[in-house]
Image (cartoon, grey):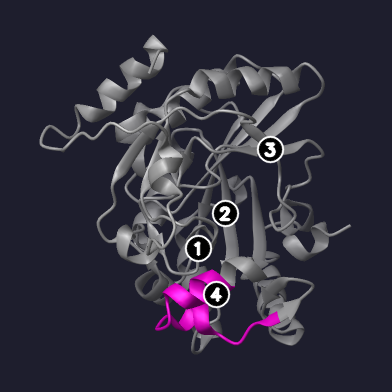
C-alpha cells in the first residue's frame, strides 16, 4: 500500500481490533469475488477487508433509486457490504461475499467528485452500498464527507441509515442543509423479523429527534415498504409514533416506495435464503424487476402518501413510481 494516507487510515482502523489476525492479500477481489461463497453465512461472522479502490469511483444513480428531484444524481461506494443484516437487502444478491470491504482512498473519490463539480452541481448518495453511520466510530467517513461538502457549494450529499443511538454531536457543520441524513423507518414487525442488527424504531426516532435538535437536515424514507401480516395496522402504529414524537414541520422531505429488486439479485437471494418469508414472497416480475402486484403496490404506497399528506405538503413527498420517465 504505497499511499501514506491510505496506510495511515488502515493502521487507524486496525487499532480498533488489537486481537485480530492480519492477513495480507494482493487484491481484495481475490477474496471477495471467490466462487461458491455463502454470503448469508459469512454475514454471521464477517471478516473486514481493507483495500484501495481503482477505476471509476462515482456512478450515475440507479433507476430503482429516487433522485429526490435532482437532475445530476450520483452515488459512490466507500464500502462494500454492511454491518447490518437486512434479509431483503439487494447486496445479498449483488455480491458473492458477505464480508465487508472498506476502501481507504477516500481522497481519490473526492477528486472524482470535484471533476464532476467542474461541470455541474452534484447530488451524491455516499451511503449507498452500505450504512456508513453504522461504522462511523471506525472510519470517520461521514464526518470527512460533511467537511468536504462544506468546501464545495454545489455539492449536496445524502447519508442514508437505519442506525439508532447516533452520536451526532461528534459530526461537524450542523444546520447548513448540504448534508441530508435520510433515515429509513420501518414498523417494529419489519425491524424485528427482517432488519437484523439495525436500530430499533424507538432508537431511530431518538436519533432523528437528536439530529434535528442539532440543526441537521433530516429526510424520512418509507422505502422500501415491506408487506407483512396486517400491514396497515403495523404501519399505522409506526406512523402514529412518528407523527406524535417528531416535529413533522421540520422534516426536509420524505420518500415512499415499496420493495423492488432486479431479477438476477432476487434469484441469487432465493438460493441462499430458502427460509426467508420476505425473499420467497411470490413477487411479480415486470421487465426484469420483481415487485408486489400493481394492486398491492398502489394500496400500500397510496395509503402511506395519504397519511403523510396530513403532515407534509405534496411537493415534499417523493414517490418512486412517479420518478419514472
Q: Which mark is residue 89?
A: 1
Q: Which mark is residue 211?
A: none
Instruction: Tell me which label, 4 or 3, sits earlier in the chain.
Output: 3
Q: Eyeballing the image, is 113 above or below 259?
A: above
CB under 8 Å between callouts 3 and 1?
no
Q: Eyeballing the image, is 305 above or below 1?
A: below
Quadrant in the picture for the C terminus: bottom right
SS at circle 2: strand
Q: Mark 4: few, some, or many residues within 10 Å (few <14, many ≥20)? A: many
Q: Quadrant of residue 6?
A: top left
Quadrant in the picture for the N terminus: top left
The magenta segment is: 267-284
Q: Mark 2: few, some, or many residues within 10 Å (few <14, many ≥20)? A: many
Residues 28 and 238: in front is 28
CB under 8 Å between callouts 3 and 2?
no
Pair 1/2: label in front: 1
Q: Mark 1: few, some, or many residues within 10 Å (few <14, many ≥20)? A: many
Residue lying at 41% horizontally and 55% vertically, measured from the top left: 97
Amino acid at each position: 500500500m504505497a499511499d501514506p494516507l491510505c496506510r495511515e487510515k488502515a493502521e487507524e482502523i486496525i487499532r480498533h481490533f488489537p486481537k485480530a489476525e492480519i492477513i495480507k492479500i494482493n487484491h481484495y477481489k481475490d477474496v471477495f469475488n471467490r466462487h461458491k461463497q455463502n454470503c448469508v453465512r459469512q454475514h454471521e461472522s464477517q471478516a473486514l477487508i481493507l483495500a484501495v479502490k481503482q477505476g471509476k469511483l462515482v456512478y450515475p444513480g440507479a433507476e430503482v433509486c429516487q433522485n429526490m428531484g435532482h437532475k445530476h444524481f450520483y452515488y459512490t461506494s466507500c464500502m462494500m457490504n454492511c454491518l447490518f443484516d437486512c434479509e431483503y437487502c439487494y447486496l445479498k444478491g449483488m455480491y458473492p461475499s458477505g464480508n465487508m470491504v472498506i476502501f481507504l482512498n477516500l481522497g481519490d473519490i473526492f477528486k472524482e467528485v470535484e471533476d464532476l463539480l467542474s461541470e455541474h452541481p452534484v447530488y451524491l448518495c455516499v451511503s449507498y452500498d452500505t450504512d456508513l453511520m453504522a461504522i462511523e466510530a471506525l472510519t470517520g467517513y461521514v464526518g470527512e464527507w460533511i467537511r468536504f461538502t462544506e468546501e464545495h457549494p454545489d455539492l449536496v450529499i445524502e447519508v442514508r441509515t437505519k442506525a439508532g443511538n447516533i452520536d451526532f454531536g461528534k459530526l461537524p457543520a450542523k444546520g447548513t442543509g448540504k448534508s441530508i441524513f435520510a433515515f429509513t423507518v420501518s414498523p417494529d414487525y419489519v425491524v424485528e423479523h427482517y432488519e437484523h442488527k439495525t436500530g430499533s424504531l424507538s432508537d431511530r426516532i431518538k436519533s432523528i429527534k437528536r439530529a434535528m435538535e442539532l440543526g441537521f437536515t433530516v429526510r424520512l424514507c418509507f422505502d422500501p415498504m415491506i408487506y407483512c401480516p396486517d400491514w396497515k395496522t403495523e404501519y399505522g402504529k409506526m406512523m402514529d409514533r412518528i407523527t406524535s414524537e417528531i416535529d413533522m414541520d421540520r422534516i426536509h422531505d420524505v420518500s415512499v416506495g415499496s420493495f423492488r429488486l432486479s431479477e438476477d439479485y432476487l434469484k441469487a437471494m432465493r438460493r441462499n435464503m430458502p427460509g426467508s418469508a420476505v425473499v420467497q414472497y411470490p413477487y411479480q416480475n415486470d421487465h426484469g424487476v420483481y415487485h408486489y402486484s400493481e394492486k398491492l403496490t398502489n394500496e400500500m404506497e397510496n395509503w402511506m402518501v395519504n397519511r403523510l399528506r396530513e403532515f407534509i405538503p405534496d411537493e415534499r413527498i417523493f414517490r418512486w413510481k412517479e420518478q419514472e420517465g
